[in-house]
Image (tube, rainbow, N blue to C red):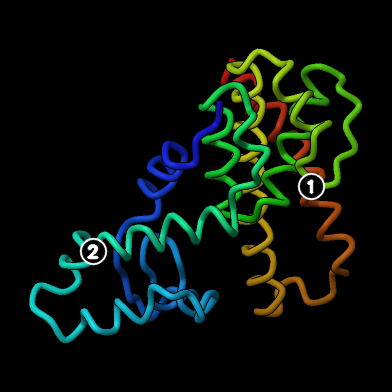
Amino acid sequence: MGELETALDYALGHEGWYSNNPKDPGGETWRGIARRHWPNWAGWARIDVAKSQPNFPASLRQDSVLNTLVLAFYRENFWNTLYNDISNQAVATRLFDFGVNVSPNIATRAIQESANTIASSGLRVDGKFGTGTLRAVNAIEPESLIKEFRARKTVYYAAVGIRRLLKSLKDGGWLRAVPKAAIERAVDYATTFMLGWMRRAMS
């Protein structure tokens, strides 16, 4: 069954510890929690106090209260209670991790599309992880589901990169005359083919 603590250990391996990079749109960040996006998180008060103490920010790693607040944050904002009933931990972990990085809605759409592709599950791709999605996910062999899910994650990230590139070209005047709808059609065309390539590469 899915366990948040295990999934969070995996996700935080990607998120890192403390950072305050002015080039980061999220600003000051602790364990993936960006202050600009989550300014009211209770952990910021403890972090601000720790700034005046020796060995900051390494000292934060030993703060058990702060660690508890991190766990509570991810449970409240990213861990659907139905994830507890996902029969394979690796599936639950990767679904949660992708949700942390992009959004739970996008991650759920990807797992729904994966289930429909592998097992013709007939799920409505709505980004809502309910009991129907849970049943479909649990009915599929985990490795097959993870492989398809990984392909869809990779293509999603590639599409983000393509959109950012095209936006910079459009903002710079190179694509100013190209309608936004045409750009989106080009992105959809590219990602459709990339998905097929990713499946083959991972087979």
Circles 2 and 1: CB atoms closer than 8 Å? no
Task: Give the residue pinned by disc 2.
Answer: 63
Q: Residue at x 61, y 18 (%)?
A: 142
Q: Secondary structure at mark 2?
A: loop
Question: Does residue 22 lie above or below 65 as drawn?
Answer: below
Residue 81 in the image, given as x and y percentages of width and height? 64, 43
Question: Does residue 161 lie above or below 86 as drawn?
Answer: below
User: Is tag 2's residue or tag 1's residue first in the polypeptide sequence?
Assistant: 2
Task: Give the residue pinned by disc 1.
Answer: 127
Which of 51/166 is in front? 51
Q: Which image quadrant for residue 138?
A: top right
Residue 56 in the image, given as x and y percentages of width and height? 16, 74
Residue 61 in the image, given as x and y percentages of width and height? 22, 60
In which quadrant is the N terminus drawn? Answer: top right
Q: CA distance from mark 2 to mark 1?
A: 35 Å
In which quadrant is the C terminus drawn? Answer: top right
Query: Is residue 4 shown left or right of residue 10?
Result: right
Residue 40 in the image, given as x and y percentages of width and height? 51, 80
Q: Secondary structure at mark 1?
A: loop
Q: Amino acid at mark 2?
A: Asp
Residue 188's disc is: none
Query: Is residue 176 shown left or right of residue 164?
Result: right
